[in-house]
Amino acid sequence: MKYSFTKSPLLIWALALILGLGGCDLSSYNENPNEPTAGNPDAILAKAERDLASNTHGDGIMSNMNLNAQYTTQNQYTDRYGGVSYEWGSFYTTLNDLQEVKRLSDQSNSAAPENIEAVATIIQAWAFQILTDVYGDIPFEEALQGAENRSPSYTAQENIYPALIDSLDQAIGKISVGSGGPRSDLIHGGDMEKWKRFANGLKMRIGIRAVDANRDLAERAITEANGNALQSNEDNTYFQFSTSSAHRSSYHDNRVVLGRDDYDVSERFVDAMGQYDVNDPRMDAYFEQTSSTTAPCEDGSGSYKGFPFEREQQSATELKNVTNTCEYSRPETFWPSGPSGDGDAYKPMMYYDEILITKAEAAARGIINGNPKDYLKQAIEASVNFYGEVVPGADIEADDPETQKYIDAVQSDYDRSNFEQVIGEQRWFAFYMNDVQGWSTFRRLDFQGWHGPPVGGVANDFGTFIPLRAGYPSSEQQLNGTNYESAVERQFGGVSGDDAGSYIWWDEEGSLIPESARY
């Protein structure tokens, strides 16, 4: 298991750099090219890593992407997809910061220039894929040019995907494992071998997501990266917040410090993980057990109960008010508060089990050799072992007979002619609390039986029962109107199609479930 940065001098050193950077306007570093730059690439890198982690695992994860994936549900003040939104400006700010890291790479106090540049490029690829998977076409080729281009055109998603793979190949080619990595790196601590494996893992993620839209691209990315991506749980890639008030998870602040109790685990997700005669053992790491107490909820019942997904507000509030706080399962404390319970939460970026599930699907599609069932078994075992080590109180192990019974049930349920169902479910389970990844999995694979419209109905009718994308922020219409209009015309036939019911490039079939299968 990767050591916890919150206990290391590395985090203290990197956070000191961030605090030293303060609220500086990073664009000002380019104002006078005749003066020595005041930029510190080590500090900017650490700040960028933390900012992206906060954007993708802060308190906002509960009100958007977890709802889109139907992992959790509001138990009062329900939105019912009344507004579907995601970060935009903050992402581009951080992407610009990473561009500055690359520009200043030869001024790093801790890393070989090629290594800090490679790290920044890999993180940019990870972030750009998230943005394009949420919106579709985005400013990409003309983005990050600062004052030289304040109104960048949009790049088509089908062109962004191969460009991301090319950028990852360039980063992999730059990495010098024998040279120093950035000490300020809060994700892998400057371990360049792990960064190389993560980059190859991203190639596999990008490839499998594009497989229905561009089979040739998918095959190339997956076969090139297969065997070179994450090798074990030791390579798991995540950002870990610290416990200080300035740098802990905002999700922890919302649930623990402010005492908000607005979200329970979705009934649909609990039912899916408990569909067999034996439960998915990860439920013990994902959910609090039910009890007759009020928060903090006490484990011991061995039972899990999800709250009905997105009832109408009055109905949800009435149900919540007549029950004990812990009658319905909430996300396990680890997710907002980390292993210490004080805010040092993990922001997942990529775990080893994802690589194995990708291999299962690639094998099922004939892209690589191997037995999909074997890869699924290995994926579940890797996931169970990881969470059994990092989640306090999660008494789960891959070798436990109950885990093996669960794996047997999954393998028995696997249907070669409908591999999307079981592989889709397991990918959905593995991506719990991983921002857009679980939602993207359902949009692409369209596995059935679990997702559906809110129990209270969709509040803002956009033609589908689950959001398929987020509409562009209004700032784009105001500040980049001509390019915005061209992008929505190309993708959706006009501005009226810029809503949550329009398909993006790789969502070939669209998430259309027959009426008979809907809730």
Image (tube, rainbow, N blue to C red):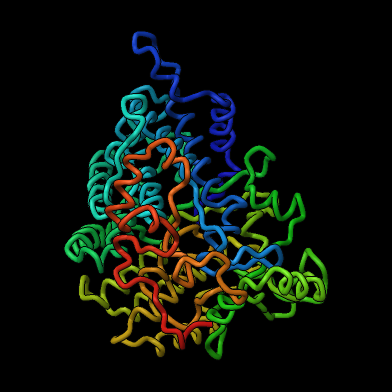
The relative height of residue 466 versus residue 248 in the rendered view (above or below) is: below
Expressed as whole percent of the image width and height from the top left, the position of residue 307 reads 66, 75
**In-front residue for pair 317/461:** 461
Q: Is residue 158 above or below residue 28?
A: below
Is residue 123 left or right of 332 when viewed as pictured? left
Question: Image quadrant of residue 115?
Answer: top left
Q: Say which of 333 and 260 sits in front.
A: 260
**Of 248 and 265, the residue lying toward us:** 265
Q: Residue 255 appears at what percent x and percent y?
A: 71, 55
**Image point (34%, 8%), residue name:** 34
In the image, residue 124 sits, relative to residue 497, either above or below, namely above
Residue 39 appears left or right of 330 = left
Q: Residue at x 33, y 68 (%)?
A: 358
Q: Residue at x 62, y 48 (%)?
A: 249
Residue 503 in the image: state x and y as whole percent.
35, 64
Query: Which residue is at 52% across, 60% downward?
Result: 65
Tell whether 19 sits left or right of 509: right
Count of marks, rendered view = 0
Q: Is residue 133 visible?
A: yes
Give percent across and percent down for residue 356. 36, 68
Q: Is the C terminus in the top left, top right, bottom left or bottom right quadrant?
A: bottom right
Residue 112 visible in image: no
Residue 511 shown left or right of residue 450 in the figure: left
